[in-house]
Amino acid sequence: MKLHRFFSPTKIDDGVSAMEGQTFTFTDVSQQWQKVLRLSRGEQVALFDGSGHDFLCEIKDYQGNTVVLTILEKKENRVTAVRDVVLYVALVKKDTFEWVVQKATELGVSDIVPVIAERSEKKNINIERLQKIITEASEQSGRGVLPGLHDIVSLVDAVEAAKVRDGKVTQMIAFDPTGIKMSEQEIKNTPDQVGIFIGPEGGWSMKELDYFRKSGVAVYSLGPQILRTETAVVAALSKIVF
């Protein structure tokens, strides 16, 4: 039977080693757990706190809107991507962008950076709503660390930020129908740290494509078809992340 899995915004073993038998209180979930999921005392759930560990817990008691849990086991979460991939994605309409954030999280990106492009349809995002989507997608997909959601940036700032991360040079890749097809060997040889740029509906402008090439960003094609932004995100990440 598959365990229900939940993200804890509070560090489970903050300051102490979370060993078997310790108790942990989880707040603001009692209503959902009891009324919606019908989780009873004695049932087991899995928690993660973004530390890269999973905690197998048993429900000990409900106290108002707080659940008291007994930690049964702490283990390293091994659901990780092959590469550290930052997704720089142009802003698109609300529902589409939320879908992109959800699927990018499921596919294992380390960070999501919204980018204002010349053809972007909107200029803002709902951070709180997107963080909720990221949390739920991380719970569902089994990953142990939530991807970072960054503030909106211009394309120039995105490229500058992508060049070097954590002291390491990043390979930057933009996808556009005008680019060359990425070979299997090039995919295999992609380094461990990558920045992927996906454009808005209508694609990158000629000015933006020229800027990519002048800035050392390789421009590749996902095929002759004109893909929607959300389709391009899934196609590109499926090639690179795994």
Image (cartoon, grey):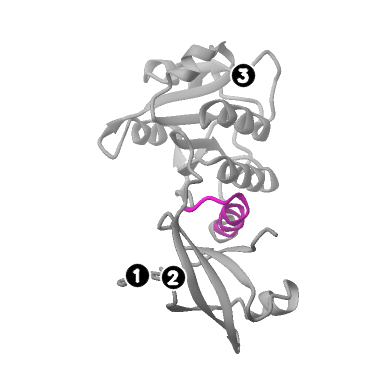
Identify the residue at the far bottom of this view. Answer: 64
Judge left or right: residue 204 versus residue 153. right
Figure label count:
3
**Residue 34 point in image, percent of width and height:** 70, 79
Mark 3 or mark 1, which is nearer the start of the sequence? 1
What type is the residue that disc 1 sits on?
Asp
Out of 242 and 151, give the one closest to the viewer: 242
**Residues in magenta?**
131-144
Tell me the mark number nearer the camera, choosing from 3 and 2.
2
Q: Tell me the residue at 49%/36% (across/down).
A: 88
Residue 134 on the magenta segment: yes
Q: Tell me the residue at 57%/74% (across/down).
A: 58
Q: Tell me the residue at 64%/48% (across/down).
A: 98
Q: Which residue is mark 2?
A: 10
Identify the residue at the far left of this view. Answer: 167
**Residue 160 point in image, percent of width and height:** 34, 32
* Label 3 residue SS: loop
Q: Which residue is mark 1?
A: 14
Q: Which residue is mark 3?
A: 222
* Label 1 residue SS: loop
Tell me the mark number nearer the camera, choosing from 2 and 1.
1
What type is the residue that disc 2 sits on?
Thr
Out of 139 and 98, give the one closest to the viewer: 139
Tag 3: Cα neighbours inside 10 Å, few (<14), some, or many (≥20)? some
Per the model, the C-alpha gap separating discs 1 and 3 is: 44 Å
Tell me the mark number nearer the camera, choosing from 1 and 3.
1
Q: Quadrant of residue 199?
A: top right
What type is the residue that disc 3 sits on?
Leu
Mark 2 or mark 3, which is nearer the start of the sequence? 2
Which quarter of the image is occupied by the N terminus?
A: bottom right
Tag 1: Cα neighbours inside 10 Å, few (<14), some, or many (≥20)? few
Residue 185 on the magenta segment: no
